[in-house]
Image (spheres, rainbow, N blue to C red):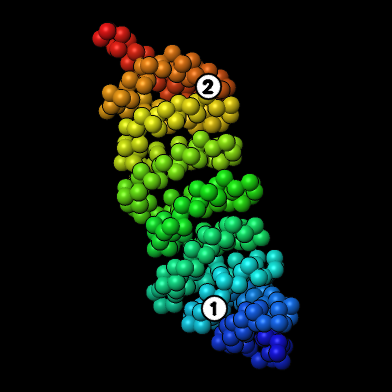
C-alpha cells in the first residue's frame, strides 16, 4: 500500500487535513516494516507536500484554516512524536522539509493556544530526545534547529534548563566536529538569553553547578570552545537582568584567577573578552579582601598584561579609557597595601 496522498489532488479532489496527517502517520509507521525503502519514498513525498501546504509557494499562500486543522490533527494523532522519533531514519531532503514544518507548527495557534508547543509540554521526553541527538552526526544540525524553535517558548526552555539533559551542552561544546559544536553553543546561548526571568531563576538556584561547569569551557584546550564561551560570558555578565549573578560571580577568587589566566591567552580576541570580565572584578566598589589580596599580589604582572593588550591605537576610545581606569585602580590598591606595611 502506498501512503501518498497527492494523487487525490491530481484527480481534482482537495485533500483534507485529516487525510494529510493520516497519510504521513501511516508512512512514518511503515518505516518499521520490511517495505522501508518504499516507505522512505512515501515519507519524503508526504512531508514535502506538508511543507508546501504549511508554507505555500511562490504562487500560493497557505490556507490558514487548513494549517490550523493540520496542527490540531498532528497533535491528536501523535504525529509530532513520530516526527522526532523517526528523524534518524529519514533522508536529508525529508529532514530539511520536516524542520521547516516544525517551525511553522510550533507557532500555529488553535484558538488562543500554540497546540504543538503544548503537546511538547506534555511529552517532554521528545525535548530530551532532541538534545541527545547532538550525538548523532547525521541529524545533529536538524535537531539543533528544532530545539531552538522550541526554546522560543518559555515553558519549553524552562524544562530544558532544569532537566538533566542541559548538562550535555557542556559536553557538546567540546565536540571535535566544528559545525556541531558551534550549533550546540548557539542553542546553549539561546537557552540562556531568550527568557530573562526564567534564566535568572535558574542561575540563582543552580549557580554553583552551572559556573563550575562553565569554568571548564572557558579554560578548554579547544580554541573554538574557549573563544566563544569567554565572549558569551563577557556579554552575559554585563546584561542588566543578570546583575545579581554578576555581583556574586565577581566576589569569587577562583573566577578572578580564571579570568587572569585568560589575559595571558595567545588569542587577541580572548584577551579582550577576558579584560571585559576582569574590569568588573577590579571596578567593583565592594571588593572582598580576598579579591584585593590577589590583585595586589599580582599587580606587576597584571599591569604588564593590561598595558600589552593587543589593541590598535584609536581602535576603541572607550576601551582605552576603561584600560586606563583599571590600571589606576590596581596601582591605587598596590599603593594602599604598601602604606599599610
The quarter of the image holding the C terminus is: top left
291 to 168, vertically: above or below: above
**Label 2 SS:** loop
x and y percent of residue 314 in the render? Answer: 54, 21
The quarter of the image holding the N terminus is: bottom right
Observer-nearest of 208 and 24: 208
Write the residue at 49% across / 79% down.
75
Residue 282: name its quadrant.
top left
Q: Which residue is mark 2?
A: 309
Q: Is residue 157 toward the left or the right of residue 93 in the image?
A: left
Write the residue at 50% across / 51% down.
169
* Residue mark closest to the camera, 1 vs 2: 1
Write the residue at 32% across / 36% down.
247
**Label 1 SS:** helix
Farthest residue to the front: give it: 34
Q: Which mark is residue 79?
A: 1
- Number of other residues with Cα within 10 Å of mark 1, as a class: few under 14, some 14 to 19, many 20 or more: many
Residue 3: name its quadrant.
bottom right
x and y percent of residue 239 in the render? Answer: 39, 41
Q: CA distance from mark 1 to mark 2?
A: 55 Å
Whether pointer 1 and pointer 2 mark residues with C-beta atoms closer than 8 Å, the reply is no
- Number of other residues with Cα within 10 Å of mark 2, as a class: few under 14, some 14 to 19, many 20 or more: some
Q: Is residue 10 toward the left or the right of residue 231 in the image?
A: right
Residue 258: name its quadrant.
top left
Amino acid at each position: 500500500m502506498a501512503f501518498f496522498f497527492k494523487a487525490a489532488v491530481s484527480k481534482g479532489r482537495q485533500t483534507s487535513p485529516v487525510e494529510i496527517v493520516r497519510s504521513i502517520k501511516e508512512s512514518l509507521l511503515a518505516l518499521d516494516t520490511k517495505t522501508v525503502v518504499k516507505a522512505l519514498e512515501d515519507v519524503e513525498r508526504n512531508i514535502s507536500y506538508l511543507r508546501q501546504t504549511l508554507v505555500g509557494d511562490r504562487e500560493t499562500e497557505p490556507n490558514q484554516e487548513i494549517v490550523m486543522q493540520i496542527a490540531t490533527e498532528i497533535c491528536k494523532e501523535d504525529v509530532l512524536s513520530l516526527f522526532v522519533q523517526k528523524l534518524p531514519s529519514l533522508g536529508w531532503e525529508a529532514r530539511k522539509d520536516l524542520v521547516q514544518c516544525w517551525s511553522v507548527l510550533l507557532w500555529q495557534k488553535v484558538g488562543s493556544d500554540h497546540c504543538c508547543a503544548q503537546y511538547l509540554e506534555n511529552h517532554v521526553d521528545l525535548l530530551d530526545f532532541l538534545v541527545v541527538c547532538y550525538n548523532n552526526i547525521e541529524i545533529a544540525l536538524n535537531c539543533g534547529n528544532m530545539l531552538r524553535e522550541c526554546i522560543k517558548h518559555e515553558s519549553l526552555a524552562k524544562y530544558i534548563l532544569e532537566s538533566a539533559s542541559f548538562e550535555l551542552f557542556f559536553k557538546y561544546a567540546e565536540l571535535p566536529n566544528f559545525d556541531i559544536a558551534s550549533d550546540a553553543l548557539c542553542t546553549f546561548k539561546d537557552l540562556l538569553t531568550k527568557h530573562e526571568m526564567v534564566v535568572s531563576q535558574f542561575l540563582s538556584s543552580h549557580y554553583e553547578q552551572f559556573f563550575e561547569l562553565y569554568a571548564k569551557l572557558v579554560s578548554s584546550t579547544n580554541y573554538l570552545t574557549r573563544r566563544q564561551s569567554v565572549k558569551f560570558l563577557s556579554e552575559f555578565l554585563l546584561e542588566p537582568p543578570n546583575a545579581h549573578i554578576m555581583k556574586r560571580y565577581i566576589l569569587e577568587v577562583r573566577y578572578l584567577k580564571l579570568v587572569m589566566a585568560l589575559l595571558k591567552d595567545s588569542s587577541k580576541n580572548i584577551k579582550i573578552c577576558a579584560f571585559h570580565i576582569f574590569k568588573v572584578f577590579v571596578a567593583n566598589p565592594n571588593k572582598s579582601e580576598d579579591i584585593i589580596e590577589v590583585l595586589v599580589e599580582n599587580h606587576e604582572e597584571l599591569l604588564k598584561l593590561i598595558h600589552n593588550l593587543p589593541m590598535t591605537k584609536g581602535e576603541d576610545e572607550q576601551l582605552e579609557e576603561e584600560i586606563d581606569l583599571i590600571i589606576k585602580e590596581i596601582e591605587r590598591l598596590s599603593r594602599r597595601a604598601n602604606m599599610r606595611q
